[in-house]
Amino acid sequence: MARKLTQRILDHMARPGYRPKKARALAREMGIAEGEYGDFRQTIKALRAAGRLVLGRGNAVLLPEGGTQVIGQYRANPRGFGFITPEAPSTHGDLFVPAGAALDAVTGDTVMTRVTKAGKRSGQMVYRARVVRVLARGHNRFVGELHKADGGWYVRPEGNILHVPILVADARAAGARRGDQVVVEIVTYPSADTPAQGVITEVLGPRGKPGVDVLTVLRQYGLPDVFDEAALEAARRIVDEFDVEAVLGDREDLRDLTVITIDPQDARDFDDAISLQMKSDGLFELGVHIADVSAFVAENSRLDDEARRRGNSVYLPRFVVPMLPELLSNGLCSLQEGQPRLTKSAFIRYDRKGRRRSVRLANSVIRSTARLSYEEAALILDGRTGGFKKPVVSLLRQMEELARIIQRRRLTDGMLVLDLPEVELVFDDEGKVIDAEPADDSFGHTIIEMFMVEANEAVAETLYESGAAALRRIHPEPDAAGAGGLARYLRLLGHDVSMAPERDDLQRLLDEVRGTPHAFAVNLAILRSLQQATYSPELVGHYALASEHYLHFTSPIRRYPDLTAHRLVERYLRGELKKKRRRRQAVEDEELIELGRHCSFTERRAADAERELTQIKVLELLSERLGDKVRGVVTGVAQFGVFVQLERFLIDGLIPVADLADDWWLLDQRAGCLIGEMSGKRIAIGDLVEVRISSVDVPARRLDLAYISHRSSPRPGAAGPKQPETRPKKRKRAPKAKSRRKKGTGHSKRRAR
């Protein structure tokens, strides 16, 4: 089975509406083939032995109630209450923690709770939890602004982890002044009776000074921003000792082949290049050439240890925390134009329907013919070819043809495509955001994305067939909570979907709403319902890509999992891997599992840090535009207000219910709207609104909006004719940042795959 049985069984039983049944009936319900039932039965037994499943009346299989004690991760709400996400699936789901029942737990802590029943709601038992013990702290360092009041010093933490001030002793001993941004280590965590107390460990500088916001995020997320001298010296030795002529005998020499890179204008590290040839048998031969970092960074070396610890490069607005020293990441390993570079190449042959006919992997040497930006690629594809070499123009046009063929095939195969707006931030020379503009969405992005996805999938399948245990990129199907929540949300918008929608159902819905007022709300809801892709050796496919085998191979300069894939490819090329097919339920490699957890963590940390700094910079911009009118879409409603995402800046704000037009507003949860009792007006999810920027609290990451007017979004059947599709669909990529400054000083590309 493509998905690991353990998780598949647990997810199925956690779905809304599941009714306990015997193992044989459960297997039929899940579509388990008769030949797979033996493995299924053994998995059920193992889950029972581990206490993750129990037998009920008539030997029916069900999830355990969870008992009176549950261990999970705590997340706090600024209003005093919180929630527990249990470590193991149970019938409880997430648990509500009332105000005052969290001891001194803060967001991210692992806690033990006592669970009690709180009565029934809509026929379902409701549970509440009280924290009885904090098992592990998620955070012990915080960053915030230093204040003085009533003769005492305190730090107001940034962000949404800790919502109370931290008292500190005489700040002058640390050399800090009022208004400085400081790092404080917690000594006493806050509780109902005791304030938080801490010690200042670092002074970052006056809040608002250029660069202090970057340092704030680096320290807040524990990101290593410098390499030690040993790592730098190792990189220098590698560069000094490299001789390309000495390795040519062991590699395919492709230096005369037309090869190009396409990257953002301000990219500095180039880890992938493309060639494409038409063969005499009518097949396309795509060459995806990836920087061979493994040729320079030996396993368990000083540089390897550092790269593994970092996990990935971190791309913040106008600042990069590289995984490898820049002598390698921006130098010897980067596929710079005109320079001979070592690569690992995947040669993939396609027929005219975009089906792969063969895959060949090789060690190679290339010399990039041209370094194109996405903007330059768009010019060529639009027919404006002046100043570009003819072989480059011809290659790019062939690339476009093949990419469109592959895209059609992948869509037919079930690839899920979300169409969400993206923006680029515009900076001045001081690093301050001065505006936002629509992101470039030319087809050049899709060309590279399609080819990278194909190369990743082809390498994953090759390694799987060879018997290798690899660190895969897995993306499970939506879990029960996500699928059920999405279905309920879509029904609020008037779309009749099942409580467990399939991927084809979602793509059909996305096609139906394209060009309608509901498009943004539907796309955003589907995105939020999906589970997060992670790294693991488990035989779980990639849901969004409709791929059975998938890993990351194409960015070893900036992702450690890609470097591990390159090392496996090297073993494959040397004939060191077994040439027989692995059993699907293979014994998992514990070291790979742990490495996958670590790399998944560093990836989430990097994404969170980028999002945080982007949010800070946008909020600082909006703080100078108080009173401006802006447009947005309603993404959620609650008794205390309306959540709105601003169209231009893609940032969330809140219209407090007290600031709505004079009326008494009632929440209709079933309809997903607020209703004015006197006026009868409805403000519903998916509505387009015009608001005014009311207030901004940068440290709290809070944006308050004032309601001006709104336009109800028509429900299905009432909408006008759909707008024609004017560009190819593409999946959501992380927002890019753009700066008005000298070429070559910006951050590198980031592709979300």
Image (cartoon, helix red, strand yellow):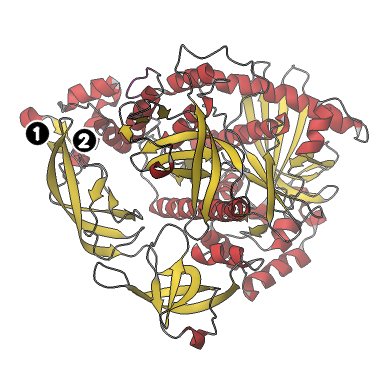
Q: Residue at x 36, y 30 (%)?
A: 676
Instruction: Residue 469: tell me if it is visible.
Output: no
- Residue 563 at x, y percent in the picture: 59, 51
**Magenta stretch: dominant SS?**
loop
Determine whether label 1 and label 2 are within 8 Å by CB.
no
Q: Residue furthest bottom?
A: 173
Of residues 361 and 490, which is closer to you in this image? 490
Of residues 652 and 56, which is closer to you in this image? 652
Residue 262 falls left or right of residue 173: right
| Disc 1 residue type (three-letter) | Gly
Q: Which stretch appears magenta?
A: 496-500
Q: Element type at marker 1?
A: loop
Q: Is residue 667 above or below residue 714?
A: below
Instruction: Tell which circle, 1 or 2, labels the residue nearer the N-terminal end.
Output: 2
Residue wearing tag 2: 44
Q: Is residue 49 above or below residue 522?
A: below
Of residues 90 and 344, which is closer to you in this image? 90
Q: Element type at marker 2?
A: helix
Residue 56 shows which numbered tag?
1
Residue 742 falls left or right of residue 662: right
Q: Residue at x 31, y 31 (%)?
A: 669
Instruction: Residue 437: tell me if it is visible.
Output: yes
> Is residue 601 covered in magenta?
no
> Is residue 498 covered in magenta?
yes
- Residue 281 at x, y percent in the picture: 74, 17
Residue 179 falls left or right of residue 79: right
Q: Residue 732's quadrant in the figure? A: top right
Q: Nearer the viewer, mark 1 or mark 2?
A: 1
